[in-house]
Amino acid sequence: MAARSQQLAAALLSLLCGVSCFPLGQETKQTLTCGYESCHATKPNMLNVHLVPHTHDDVGWLKTVDQYYYGDRNDIQHAGVQYILDSVVDQLLKNPDRRFIYVETAFFYRWWKQQSSSMQQTVKQLVNEGRLEFVNGGWCMSDEATTHYSAVIDQMTMGLRFLNETFGPCGRPRVAWHIDPFGHAREHASMFAQMGYDGFFFGRLDYQDRARRMVKREQELLWRASNSLTPPMADLFTGILPNGYNPPEGFCWDQSCDDPPIRDDPDLEDYNVDDVVKRFLTIANSQAMVYKTNHIIMTMGSDFQYENANLWYKNLDKLIRYVNGQQANGSKVNVLYSTPSCYLQELHRANLTWALKTDDFFPYADDAHDFWTGYFTSRPALKRYERISNSNLQTCNQLEILGGPVSRKGPFGDGESQTMKKAMAVAQHHDAVSGTEKQHVANDYARRLANGWQHCQVLVSNSLTALSGSSAKRIYCDNLNISVCPLTESSKKFSVNVYNPLARPVAWPVRLPVNGTSYVVSDAEGKSVDCQVVPVSTSTRDVRRNRGFAVNELLFQVQAPPLGFTTYSVSLLQDGPPPASTQHRTPTAIQNKFIRVTFDPDTGLLSSLSNLETKQTIKLTQNFYWYNASDGNNKESNQPSGAYIFRPNSSTPFIISKTAKTESIQTPVVQEVRQWFAPWVSQVVRLYGDSRALELEWTVGPLPIDDDLGKEVITRLDTSIKTSEYFYTDSNGREMLQRKKDFRPTWNLSQSEPIAGNYYPINSRAFIKDDVDQLTVVTDRSQGGGSLQNGSLEIMLHRRLLYDDVRGVGEPLNESSGVFPEGLVVRGCLRLSLDRPPSAADAHRPLAQQVVLQPLLTFTDGDLHPNTQLEFSGLQAALPPAVHLLTLTQWDKDSVLLRLEHQFQSQESKVNSHPVTVNLQKLFSTLEVLGVSELNLSANQWKDDMTRFHWTPQTDEKPLLKTFRDSSVWEVTLRPMEIRTFLLRVSFR
Ligand SMILES: *[C@@H]1O[C@H](CO)[C@@H](O)[C@H](O)[C@H]1NC(C)=O
Ligand SMILES: *[C@@H]1O[C@H](CO)[C@@H](O)[C@H](O)[C@H]1NC(C)=O
Ligand SMILES: [Zn+2]
């Protein structure tokens, strides 16, 4: 009560003298009443309705992030975030009871930088009093299906760090808020729990699931989001909002809405207070029927609302006054301004038990024929570019530290990695990497990533110069996937620096475009290594066109040290005609010492796969198919396939070709069977000399659309594995989830889309298995996939569609090849490994990490200076196989942020699913670790300060409340699937 009247006095003062004379310099005296303490009182014997004023500001969708910020291009969509924040702050000052939440730090940060210091003080006061509250607080509200956990943790860390540094503890969000993403990943829930959030709210889930939860009052639940982490580490209280994130029907008072305002002067026309109150009470009472407590939440806002916040607040003030006025007449409904955390606090106080959930919320359908499973694959080139950009950013971050302060000198000033960090953070938004934005916005995301990489290249070059002692100009070749690199195409002598961002050594195949026919390649010790020259394939020439002129490719395998580099030098021996040509007959088999694959000589298709070490063999055929996209004109529904939705018009895909024309190359370094299916589909089946995985490098596009039907191209692996309708996909690149055809673990599914309703996001891998065989497919980007027949696994590779799917984007997904007018051509790689089920993770975990964080090649022309240091490792020794170095990045002048991760699930591996201990002082070769503090996962709270609400599940398997202690501050133990975050104070040795 006392706190309340203080607030009132402060607000009155601000009302009287406006913003400019708001008392400054009071920070020392201020009593902080933010967070749970700033919540309005509720009434225990009434139904309390929490009104949450909010705006949903997409970090790019129909307009670019900057266009949204400024309110540019209002012809596309009326939306201007700067005006929203201006207007909301103004309106909050007018009445201390009012509340507002803000979510997307990418926007708030832009706005904050432009404010005067007195405005910044005013806003700080609002935050300190809990009148303006941050929820979620990452740079953006990430997509959950197509994002990799590494990039999600980074973008959350960036946003939350800004909030902490700007506002201190009152800026720390208590609640995660994913009101718009199109389905929800279990790994996201696990991460949010480890970031210290007390609860999580979202808006979208399958319509059947919602219907069931409404009946059973299970729209609020406890999500146990990990099979490996000890409860309650990954437990997250989860609330499903009543109406997506919109206000109840008839109560939208934004300038973009048409609902009637509250007309409360009886002397004027159309007095409607009685009607408004009655409608409101009806809605509130019926909403209360489907939730458990005497508290309900209403989201009063929507996309880009509150640009003229007066409209909303004026009517909300009146709504509260008139509805609560009825309490004098016996009404038992109490309305209040609130926030998600104030609502959550009341749920927590209710001290109930909550339904326990252990699966995820994919796929999402909002109607019987409307499965949002297309975006798992939409914009496959952007999805790959985002993934490789993450790899490059991690390398950039690591080298910034390993190379020391000189790394940061450059034309862009200090903080060369910031641009790339921001570009990656923006790309995690639920309309960015998801592929659900307009074309011009997709181009903007890609441009930002390219620009970020330009900045990082300066840093990487500086760092490599410092570490190698060679100042030779470094050349980057980002188009090796289509055999383009001007330096290697023309140079007679050059060297290749291979930087490995993983904390263990890797072997990696290198493939360089060249024009000579024989080369000598030597490693850092001067020993020559096996290499091979092979002709550039026709399909690569077709994609490359006139962007490069190499006729051959030089192949060799590199071995790179952990968190470090090695250098190979390449000299031309002989120019001349292409090497002995390829064979045009399909070989019956290709094999190395680990793997053997056979081909059907009649069709040219794969016919079997063997693991020669474990002596297992499966039948395996693989081919390409397409689904015709529905065009929205059939009987049950007129929903077409589009950027979000996958809706084939038949459950039987069309085969692109029953046979493949083949040619093959068999050398000691590599064996390839190049398969050609159609002018727009080809593949290379590739086996390197000492690889344990088989590569399927697919090239798909431009998809023909002259039949006026959009196409969605898949590849399907049909095997002899007895899958009994199960298959497995990863969640955001981490834990594996079991999937079953036409089945959901938590409700009795009525299946209405036999293909699209069985698609799931594949982030980095999927597998099928029976008791003896497990086939794992590691992808190089996020894709959608399913298992629709026994033994089969299909993965969608590319989509080209001619209709908009009416979810707002307003464009068909019809990408072209940039400078060329035809449809987009996409190339990617699936890596297959066949193992025994109990130990398969030992193979696919490291394989997937290698694809996510792949070596970076840089080139220098000519001879290297003899004093050049050719090899370097930033580690004293490789980390144990179970430990992944997830983050190593500069934090401030003297400290670095380190995340170590146990990359195995419990019971997944006989050898690796055990706790492992790492000594932080014995990690780095060039850094001395002087001090260490542990943080929560998002690095915005000290681990020891992290206390979360405790929630009780209905079905209590009593959690094993084992407490684990490290043996010393330096010796840290990681348990399966655990990520630990440390701030290390360091100095250079
Ligand atoms: C919550 O409920 C439990 C069991 O019903 C009870 O033991 C406990 O005292 C309650 N806690 C509070 C704060 O009311
Ligand atoms: C939060 O920000 C403050 C002020 O900059 C800083 O002192 C504190 O260390 C930060 N907390 C964390 C956990 O980083
Ligand atoms: Zn959105």
Image (cartoon, rainbow, N blue to C red):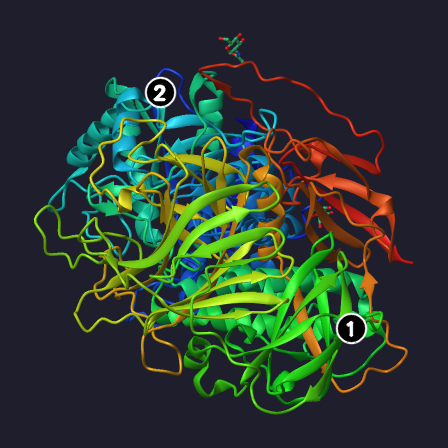
Q: Position of residue 279 (x, y in %)?
A: 18, 33
In front: 203, or 542?
A: 542
Q: Position of residue 121 (x, y in %)?
A: 60, 54
Confirm if mark 1 falls within 8 A of ligand 2: no
Q: Name above or below for residue 344 compared with residue 354.
A: below
Q: Which residue was labeled with disc 2? A: 292
Residue 71 in sight in this render:
no
Task: Inspect the image, locate mark 1, and give the three-letter code of the amino acid beneath it.
Answer: Ser
Q: Name above or below for residue 147 compared with residue 701.
A: above
Q: Calculate the distance from the C-alpha at mark 2 to the C-alpha at mark 1.
A: 71 Å
Confirm if mark 2 falls within 8 A of ligand 1: no
At a point 86% along the width and 46% down the height, the residue shown is 922
Marks 2 and 1: which is nearer the front?
1
Q: Position of residue 232 (x, y in %)?
A: 58, 25
Question: Which numbered tag is attached to residue 933?
Answer: none
Q: Name above or below for residue 864 compared with residue 336.
A: below
Q: Position of residue 544 (x, y in %)?
A: 46, 81
Q: Which residue was labeled with disc 1? A: 528
Q: Residue furthest left?
A: 635
At a point 60% along the width and 36% down the height, the residue shown is 839
Task: Inspect the image, locate mark 2, and give the three-letter code of the amino acid beneath it.
Answer: Lys
